[in-house]
Image (cartoon, coloured by chain):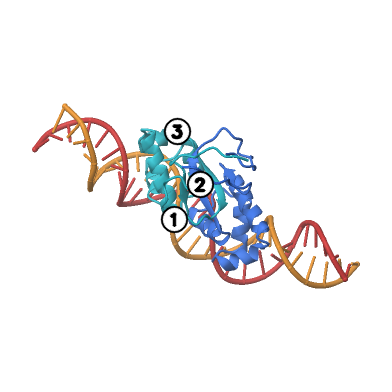
Chain colours: A blue, B cyan, C red, D orange
DNA sequence: CATATAAATACGCTTTAGCGTATAGCCGCC
DNA sequence: GGCGGCTATACGCTAAAGCGTATTTATATG
Protein backbone atom coordinates (compact mmCIF):
# COMPACT_ATOMS: atom_id res chain seq x y z
CA UNK A 1 0.00 0.00 0.00
CA UNK A 2 2.83 2.35 -0.62
CA UNK A 3 2.02 5.49 -2.49
CA UNK A 4 3.77 7.56 -5.11
CA UNK A 5 4.31 11.20 -4.43
CA UNK A 6 1.77 13.59 -5.76
CA UNK A 7 2.51 16.95 -7.32
CA UNK A 8 1.58 20.44 -6.29
CA UNK A 9 -1.01 20.43 -9.04
CA UNK A 10 -3.33 18.60 -6.71
CA UNK A 11 -5.86 21.12 -5.53
CA UNK A 12 -8.22 20.89 -2.63
CA UNK A 13 -11.54 22.50 -3.60
CA UNK A 14 -14.53 22.92 -1.34
CA UNK A 15 -16.35 25.74 -3.05
CA UNK A 16 -17.37 26.60 -6.61
CA UNK A 17 -14.85 29.39 -6.57
CA UNK A 18 -11.99 27.11 -5.65
CA UNK A 19 -13.05 24.68 -8.32
CA UNK A 20 -13.15 27.47 -10.87
CA UNK A 21 -9.69 28.60 -9.85
CA UNK A 22 -8.26 25.12 -10.24
CA UNK A 23 -9.79 24.85 -13.68
CA UNK A 24 -8.46 28.18 -14.81
CA UNK A 25 -5.00 27.33 -13.54
CA UNK A 26 -4.93 24.06 -15.40
CA UNK A 27 -6.27 25.62 -18.58
CA UNK A 28 -3.46 28.14 -18.52
CA UNK A 29 -0.96 25.45 -17.70
CA UNK A 30 -2.02 23.74 -20.88
CA UNK A 31 -1.68 26.98 -22.80
CA UNK A 32 -5.31 27.06 -23.86
CA UNK A 33 -7.76 29.90 -24.06
CA UNK A 34 -11.47 29.63 -23.31
CA UNK A 35 -12.35 29.45 -26.97
CA UNK A 36 -10.14 26.43 -27.33
CA UNK A 37 -11.91 24.72 -24.45
CA UNK A 38 -15.20 25.59 -26.10
CA UNK A 39 -14.08 23.66 -29.15
CA UNK A 40 -13.02 20.64 -27.12
CA UNK A 41 -16.36 20.62 -25.34
CA UNK A 42 -19.71 21.70 -26.70
CA UNK A 43 -20.02 24.61 -24.36
CA UNK A 44 -19.96 28.31 -25.05
CA UNK A 45 -16.98 30.45 -24.24
CA UNK A 46 -19.30 32.40 -21.93
CA UNK A 47 -20.08 29.22 -20.02
CA UNK A 48 -16.42 28.41 -19.54
CA UNK A 49 -15.95 31.93 -18.25
CA UNK A 50 -18.78 31.52 -15.74
CA UNK A 51 -17.45 28.24 -14.43
CA UNK A 52 -13.96 29.61 -13.95
CA UNK A 53 -15.46 32.55 -12.11
CA UNK A 54 -16.99 30.15 -9.63
CA UNK A 55 -20.67 30.32 -10.57
CA UNK A 56 -22.39 28.11 -7.99
CA UNK A 57 -25.18 27.25 -10.41
CA UNK A 58 -22.79 25.48 -12.72
CA UNK A 59 -24.13 22.07 -13.53
CA UNK A 60 -22.28 18.91 -12.80
CA UNK A 61 -22.40 17.70 -16.37
CA UNK A 62 -20.92 20.95 -17.56
CA UNK A 63 -18.18 20.74 -15.01
CA UNK A 64 -17.29 17.16 -15.89
CA UNK A 65 -17.09 18.08 -19.56
CA UNK A 66 -14.59 20.81 -18.80
CA UNK A 67 -12.55 18.59 -16.51
CA UNK A 68 -12.34 16.01 -19.25
CA UNK A 69 -11.24 18.59 -21.78
CA UNK A 70 -8.46 19.69 -19.45
CA UNK A 71 -7.50 16.16 -18.54
CA UNK A 72 -8.46 16.64 -14.92
CA UNK A 73 -10.35 14.43 -12.52
CA UNK A 74 -11.93 14.64 -9.11
CA UNK A 75 -10.97 12.70 -6.07
CA UNK A 76 -13.54 12.67 -3.30
CA UNK A 77 -12.27 12.07 0.19
CA UNK A 78 -12.89 12.95 3.82
CA UNK A 79 -11.85 16.50 4.60
CA UNK A 80 -8.37 17.10 5.80
CA UNK A 81 -7.28 19.68 8.32
CA UNK A 82 -5.36 21.47 5.59
CA UNK A 83 -6.73 24.83 4.57
CA UNK A 84 -8.65 24.68 1.29
CA UNK A 85 -6.22 27.18 -0.20
CA UNK A 86 -3.37 24.73 0.17
CA UNK A 87 -1.70 24.19 -3.10
CA UNK A 88 1.34 22.34 -2.00
CA UNK A 89 1.54 18.64 -1.57
CA UNK A 90 -0.57 17.98 1.49
CA UNK A 91 0.39 14.33 1.93
CA UNK B 1 7.94 15.62 0.09
CA UNK B 2 7.10 12.27 1.49
CA UNK B 3 3.43 11.44 1.65
CA UNK B 4 1.25 9.64 4.10
CA UNK B 5 -0.80 6.78 2.86
CA UNK B 6 -4.34 7.49 1.87
CA UNK B 7 -7.28 5.26 2.56
CA UNK B 8 -9.57 3.35 0.30
CA UNK B 9 -12.21 6.01 0.95
CA UNK B 10 -10.53 8.17 -1.65
CA UNK B 11 -12.69 7.94 -4.73
CA UNK B 12 -11.85 8.94 -8.24
CA UNK B 13 -14.91 10.47 -9.86
CA UNK B 14 -15.15 11.64 -13.44
CA UNK B 15 -18.88 11.55 -13.96
CA UNK B 16 -21.97 12.72 -12.07
CA UNK B 17 -22.85 9.12 -11.42
CA UNK B 18 -19.51 8.34 -9.83
CA UNK B 19 -19.80 11.44 -7.71
CA UNK B 20 -23.26 10.40 -6.60
CA UNK B 21 -22.01 6.96 -5.71
CA UNK B 22 -19.19 8.35 -3.61
CA UNK B 23 -21.62 10.59 -1.77
CA UNK B 24 -24.03 7.79 -1.08
CA UNK B 25 -21.25 5.59 0.17
CA UNK B 26 -20.02 8.21 2.58
CA UNK B 27 -23.51 9.04 3.80
CA UNK B 28 -24.02 5.40 4.67
CA UNK B 29 -20.62 5.17 6.26
CA UNK B 30 -21.70 7.97 8.55
CA UNK B 31 -24.93 6.16 9.31
CA UNK B 32 -27.11 8.98 7.99
CA UNK B 33 -30.26 8.87 5.93
CA UNK B 34 -31.22 11.42 3.28
CA UNK B 35 -33.57 13.19 5.64
CA UNK B 36 -30.74 13.75 8.04
CA UNK B 37 -28.65 15.27 5.28
CA UNK B 38 -31.60 17.46 4.38
CA UNK B 39 -31.53 18.84 7.90
CA UNK B 40 -27.81 19.49 7.82
CA UNK B 41 -28.17 21.32 4.52
CA UNK B 42 -31.14 23.35 3.32
CA UNK B 43 -31.94 20.96 0.55
CA UNK B 44 -34.91 18.67 0.07
CA UNK B 45 -34.67 14.96 0.57
CA UNK B 46 -35.69 14.63 -3.07
CA UNK B 47 -32.70 16.70 -4.10
CA UNK B 48 -30.31 14.55 -2.11
CA UNK B 49 -31.80 11.55 -3.83
CA UNK B 50 -31.28 13.06 -7.25
CA UNK B 51 -27.67 13.93 -6.58
CA UNK B 52 -26.86 10.45 -5.31
CA UNK B 53 -28.49 9.05 -8.42
CA UNK B 54 -26.02 10.99 -10.54
CA UNK B 55 -28.25 13.70 -11.99
CA UNK B 56 -25.94 15.61 -14.35
CA UNK B 57 -27.92 18.81 -13.86
CA UNK B 58 -27.01 18.98 -10.22
CA UNK B 59 -25.68 22.39 -9.40
CA UNK B 60 -22.26 22.96 -7.98
CA UNK B 61 -23.53 24.86 -4.98
CA UNK B 62 -25.87 22.01 -4.14
CA UNK B 63 -23.09 19.52 -4.45
CA UNK B 64 -20.71 21.50 -2.26
CA UNK B 65 -23.39 21.80 0.42
CA UNK B 66 -23.80 18.05 0.51
CA UNK B 67 -20.06 17.43 0.55
CA UNK B 68 -19.74 19.78 3.51
CA UNK B 69 -22.55 18.02 5.36
CA UNK B 70 -20.79 14.71 4.85
CA UNK B 71 -17.37 16.09 5.69
CA UNK B 72 -16.05 15.41 2.23
CA UNK B 73 -13.90 17.48 -0.07
CA UNK B 74 -12.76 17.46 -3.65
CA UNK B 75 -9.25 17.21 -4.87
CA UNK B 76 -8.71 18.23 -8.46
CA UNK B 77 -5.73 16.76 -10.23
CA UNK B 78 -4.51 15.59 -13.61
CA UNK B 79 -6.11 12.32 -14.62
CA UNK B 80 -4.36 9.13 -13.71
CA UNK B 81 -4.30 5.98 -15.73
CA UNK B 82 -6.29 4.25 -13.04
CA UNK B 83 -9.81 3.25 -14.01
CA UNK B 84 -12.42 5.60 -12.58
CA UNK B 85 -14.02 2.66 -10.82
CA UNK B 86 -10.92 2.21 -8.71
CA UNK B 87 -11.77 2.26 -5.09
CA UNK B 88 -8.53 1.00 -3.68
CA UNK B 89 -5.59 3.15 -2.85
CA UNK B 90 -4.40 4.41 -6.19
CA UNK B 91 -1.25 6.08 -4.98
C1' DC C 1 -48.05 -10.52 7.32
C1' DA C 2 -48.03 -6.01 9.18
C1' DT C 3 -45.80 -2.12 10.20
C1' DA C 4 -42.18 1.36 10.34
C1' DT C 5 -38.41 3.62 8.18
C1' DA C 6 -36.05 5.08 4.03
C1' DA C 7 -35.69 6.28 -0.83
C1' DA C 8 -37.80 7.46 -5.18
C1' DT C 9 -41.53 10.06 -7.68
C1' DA C 10 -45.11 13.37 -8.55
C1' DC C 11 -47.26 18.21 -9.39
C1' DG C 12 -47.21 23.00 -9.94
C1' DC C 13 -44.24 26.93 -9.35
C1' DT C 14 -40.23 30.14 -9.64
C1' DT C 15 -35.65 30.78 -10.80
C1' DT C 16 -31.87 30.24 -13.59
C1' DA C 17 -28.24 27.56 -16.53
C1' DG C 18 -26.79 27.24 -20.93
C1' DC C 19 -27.81 28.30 -25.65
C1' DG C 20 -26.90 31.43 -30.01
C1' DT C 21 -25.34 35.59 -31.11
C1' DA C 22 -23.13 39.73 -30.38
C1' DT C 23 -20.56 43.17 -28.16
C1' DA C 24 -18.02 45.58 -24.61
C1' DG C 25 -13.98 45.82 -21.74
C1' DC C 26 -8.86 44.57 -21.15
C1' DC C 27 -4.30 44.22 -21.99
C1' DG C 28 -0.19 43.59 -24.45
C1' DC C 29 2.29 44.88 -28.51
C1' DC C 30 3.70 47.03 -32.88
C1' DG D 1 -2.62 55.78 -30.86
C1' DG D 2 -4.39 51.73 -32.92
C1' DC D 3 -4.89 46.85 -33.45
C1' DG D 4 -5.60 41.94 -32.19
C1' DG D 5 -6.34 38.29 -28.99
C1' DC D 6 -8.82 37.04 -24.85
C1' DT D 7 -12.42 37.32 -21.34
C1' DA D 8 -16.60 39.23 -19.43
C1' DT D 9 -21.30 40.73 -20.34
C1' DA D 10 -25.75 41.34 -22.69
C1' DC D 11 -30.49 39.84 -24.62
C1' DG D 12 -34.16 36.75 -25.53
C1' DC D 13 -35.21 31.86 -25.39
C1' DT D 14 -35.93 27.07 -23.83
C1' DA D 15 -35.17 23.47 -20.71
C1' DA D 16 -34.78 22.07 -16.30
C1' DA D 17 -33.15 22.46 -11.13
C1' DG D 18 -34.73 23.03 -6.76
C1' DC D 19 -38.61 24.33 -3.99
C1' DG D 20 -42.90 22.85 -0.90
C1' DT D 21 -45.80 19.32 -0.26
C1' DA D 22 -47.29 14.77 -0.73
C1' DT D 23 -47.34 10.07 -2.01
C1' DT D 24 -45.70 5.79 -3.76
C1' DT D 25 -42.44 2.28 -3.72
C1' DA D 26 -38.96 -0.37 -1.66
C1' DT D 27 -36.54 -2.21 2.36
C1' DA D 28 -36.13 -3.81 6.74
C1' DT D 29 -37.81 -5.61 11.22
C1' DG D 30 -40.85 -7.24 14.65
Q: Distance between the residues labelled 2 and 1?
A: 13 Å
Residue hosting label 1: B83
Q: Which mark is residue B28?
A: none
Mark 3 residue element? helix
- B1 or D19, which is in the foreground? B1
Q: Residues within 10 Å of mark 2 (few under 14, many from 20)?
A: some
Q: In the image, what residue occupies the spot 60% across and 64% down?
A: A37
- B50 or A67, which is in the foreground? A67
Q: Where is residue B61 in the image (x, y as percent from the top left)?
A: 52, 45
Indicate which disc, 2 or 1, sits on the residue closer to the N terminus: 1
Q: Position of residue C20 (x, y in %)?
A: 57, 70
Q: Disc 3 is attached to a residue of which chain? A: B
Give left or right: position of A33 versus C11: right
- B79 or B14, which is in the foreground? B79
Indicate which disc, 3 or 2, sits on the residue closer to the N terminus: 3
Task: Give the mark toward the camera: 3 or 1.
Answer: 1
Task: Give the mark toward the camera: 2 or 1.
Answer: 2
Amino acid sequence: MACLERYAVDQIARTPKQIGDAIRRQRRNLGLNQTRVRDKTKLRQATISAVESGAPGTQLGTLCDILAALDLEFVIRPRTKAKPAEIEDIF
